[in-house]
Amino acid sequence: ERELFDMSSIRPLNPALQAIAIKELNEVPHRVPQDIEALREWILKQPNLRACTDDQFLLAFLRGTKFSLERAKEKFLRFYMLRASIPEVFNDRRLATDPQVLDIIKMGVILRLPLDLDDTGPCVTIIRAGAYDTRKYKFEDIIRVGSMFGEIMMFEDENATVSGYVEIMDMAGVSGAHLFALQPQLLSKFSTYADEAMPTRQKGINFINVPPAFESGFNSLRSFFPVKIKSRVSVSSDPEAMFQLVRREYLPKEYGGSAGTIQDISESMAAKISSYGPYFQASLNFGMEERLSEFGDQARHEQSSLFGSMGSFRKLEID
């Protein structure tokens, strides 16, 4: 069954990103269509899996696993299976038409920064952790919207699929209520999902503008992250830290940059998510069915545990 949301075509990379993809990701440009078709054929043969099979979406998984078809299959299954372990994020509010989703975007809580066309660096997202009303929204609502843009990134952000992505958690203006709402376990669980199941590579989680009084407490946040992710987490109260992470011209005016205003970025993001309305509607029906005979009783039992699910995949044999 072919995908409802079909944008089938493979965009060529610009020469600089193509060179990185060839050197670092084992990409062989003339072979890409056959590699995508091989992954798609395997997906369509999985009786318990309903999934997106768009060319560009599948290519993200191939790039994210350095064109190892077996690793791409494994990551693709994790992508759909592990969502069941984070129902706070992956639920029926994850729609481009949901008023809460659109409100969070319009508040400028999450900012995807446009990069120059010839930039080969990772894509950059700023999460303004103090910019939402904790009486109205939970931190999981912010992560839900972030996860939607993470998926859009897989379809259309070549910097993300080739060079990865960086997240900047701006803690300016955070209150005690925001800190209390931060849900470090959810942050850790979602970061693990992003690392284990998302094909785009997480290059860093940088907490900036952390009030000096909270800095040591924030450093203890690291204890919630798995070892591999812990090394990518940085914490700073230095007001200049942002400029060490992002070129000034990419930042909106409110951050001392020249890339329009926060409202300009938010409006373009709202338009972007609206254009993916059919995909997010269709994706409510994507996933692994409950009858996972090939995973055995243990995998079914471990479905509720994110880390257990990951363990079961390591023992999984893929045809």
Image (cartoon, rainbow, N blue to C red):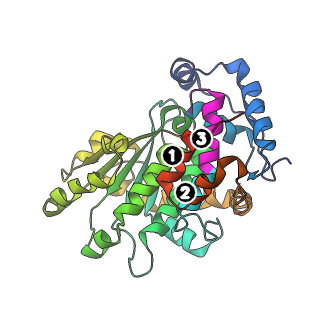
The numbered mark, 2 or 1, whose residue comes first in the sequence reads 2
Which residue is the site of mark 3? 75
Residue type, mark 2 in image: Glu
Distance in Å between CA atoms under marks 1 and 3: 13 Å
The numbered mark, 2 or 3, whose residue comes first in the sequence reads 3
In the image, farthest residue toward the right: 1
| Position in image of residue 135 (x %, y %) | 39, 82
If the image is split into quadrants, where does the C terminus sit? top right
Mark 2 and mark 1 residues within 8 Å of each other at the beta carbon: yes
**Tag 2 secondary structure:** helix
In the image, residue 270 sits, relative to residue 244, either above or below, namely below
Nearer to us: label 1 or label 3: 1
From which residue to which does the magenta span run? 65-79
**Tag 1 secondary structure:** helix
Q: Main secondary structure of the magenta part?
A: helix
Distance in Å between CA atoms under marks 2 and 3: 17 Å
* Residue shown at 46% from the left, 67% from the top: 140
| Position in image of residue 127 (x %, y %) | 40, 58
Q: Magenta segment: does it hold 68?
A: yes
Which residue is the site of mark 2? 302
Q: Residues within 10 Å of mark 1 (few under 14, many from 20)?
A: few
> Which numbered disc covers residue 154?
none
Of residues 153 and 202, the one drawn nearer to the viewer in this rendering: 202
Q: Magenta segment: does it hold 102?
A: no
Q: Quadrant of residue 44?
A: top right
